[in-house]
Amino acid sequence: MRTVNRTVSAVLALVATSPMLLWAQDDHAAEGGGGALFNINLGLSTWTLLVFGALIYVLGKYAWAPILSAVEAREKGIQDDLDQAKGQREEAAGLLAEHKKQMAEARREAHQIVQDGKDAGEKLRREIEEKARTEGSAMIERAREEIERERDAALDALRKESVDLALAAASKLIRENLDADKNRELVMGYVDDLTKSGGGAQA
Amino acid sequence: MTSLLALFQGQEGATHEAAQGAPPDLERMLMHHLTDGNEIEFEILGRGFTVHLPEWDPIHIGQLTLDLSPTKHTVFMLIAAALLVLVFGMVGRVMQRKYRDKAPSGFANAMEAMVLYFRDEIVRRNIGQGADGYTSYILTLFFFVLVMNLLGLVPFGSTATGNLSVTGALAIVSFVVVEVTGMVKLGAAGYAKTIFYVPPGLSPAMGAVMLMIMTPVEFLGKLTKPFTLAIRLFANMVAGHTLVLSLLGMIFMFTSLTFGKWAIAGASVVMVVAFTLLEIFVAFLQAYIFAMLTSVFIGMMRHAH
């Protein structure tokens, strides 16, 4: 296609310039030196077409195509890098989200564990407390029973002792059995003895 | 660099007149510098040499006589082409070898930026769908014209684009590319419409009148585009050189003044430096315009009516 264009252009150029050439040459002849500026040299035009055509081909093949292909390769490289970076960024965002999720999960689990521990501790504390309280009250109950029992025993003992004392005193009284004054003196002496012995015991 | 360059041009001009020893024939000097020739001069202050280019027998193709003898402009055009192949061949190799997966640096980076700018902002934007097939053509067109423009600013250089034969040929290539694009893209009927166009909604009689009026206009419109392309580039190049050479010529026109000549020489050199800088800008601008307008014309043809 290009070659055809170029051939056509060359032919057209020659056809188009030929009348101009005639005109320019006439002009030149009539005017002298000044017209030389507008001279058309068909040979030069042909050279121009040939050189220009060759340049289009040579530069197209060895300059513009390599330059533009290098630029496009670079553009593609940059685009690839950008795409890759975008992909990696998305991947990183996904990983971060997952990581965050895992963190939240872990935190929740830790919280759960602590809570469970607390609950278990609380329960244990309450159980121990309960047990201590029941044991304590049982012990107190036992102590109270013991005290009551001891008190009863002591009361019995005291009662028995006082009966014995009363009996002893009575028997002594009865054995003497003299007169009222003597009796009174006797009891008083007995009470004095008792007080003395009690005081002596106390002292 | 540019001031040196301007001075070189000045000295080059000076040797001419000094060698003559007669009152300066500025028109002859100017024409000598602007027009094509079969010799290339490398002379400063009367020293140096002149290369005489070979003359070949003309070739006859049917009625047409082609004189393919190399001329000054042919040689500078070939130099431009060789420079392009050398520079961009190397850039292409370096790009392939080193910069496929790494950011380019230095000259390759600069060239890549220009190439990409042209592909994206000129070719793709103006031509649209399927523009990449034209990239090679438009890029080559821009850089070829640019280097030919710039070679005229180099000492001893000559601007091949200051010759209608060159700009005309390039414009005709543009024309052919545009028209062939139209034929391929729009088909025979669609392409015919770009010449014989009747606006819809007209009565047959009015349509016929419109056809008679508009057909020559449309046809001329097609021819005007490449014509303006050729003339614009040619005229810009010639005008810039004419301006610079005329300013330098003023130095030799006023040599009879005792003190004034130094003032004029100084002013001329300053102006020449300024205009040479402008010329560098114009070289880029005109190459850009040529390539961009060609893209625009291709785009217009592809989206015609």
Image: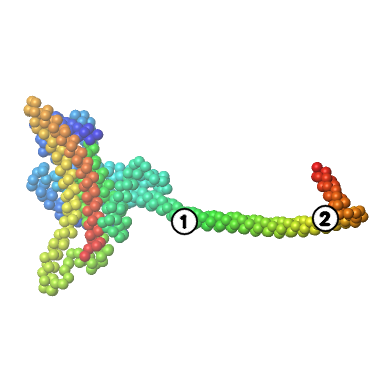
Give the colour scheme shown: rainbow
Front position in the image: A176 or A56: A176
Do the numbered discs 2 and 1 sit on residues whose CB atoms are within 8 Å?
no
Residue identifier under label 2:
A158
Residue B231 shown left or right of residue A162 in the figure:
left
* Chain of the residue under label 2: A
Quadrant of the image for the C terminus of chain B?
A: bottom left
Residue A65 horizontal/vertical position (percent): 36, 51
Residue B24 shown left or right of residue A160 in the figure:
left
Q: In the displayed orientation, state which residue is furthest to the right.
A: A175
Residue identifier under label 1:
A90
For residue B26, above or below residue A23: above
- Decide if residue A120 is in sight here: no
Front position in the image: A74 or B167: A74
Q: Residue at x 25, y 45 (%)?
A: B146
Q: Residue at x 28, y 59 (%)?
A: B128
Query: What element does badge 2 sit on?
Result: helix
Residue B76 horizontal/vertical position (percent): 24, 42
Amino acid at the residue labelled 2 = Leu
Amino acid at the residue labelled 1 = Glu
> What separation in Å lies between label 2 and label 1 (alpha carbons)?
99 Å
Residue A109 horizontal/vertical position (percent): 58, 57
Between disc 2 and disc 1, whose residue precedes?
Answer: 1
Residue B178 horizontal/vertical position (percent): 24, 58
How crowded pointer 1 is (Cα within 10 Å; few <14, some 14-19, many 20+) is rated as few
Which of the two discs, 2 and 1, sits closer to the camera?
A: 2
Same chain shared by disc 2 and disc 1? yes
Q: In the displayed orientation, state which residue is furthest to the top.
A: B258
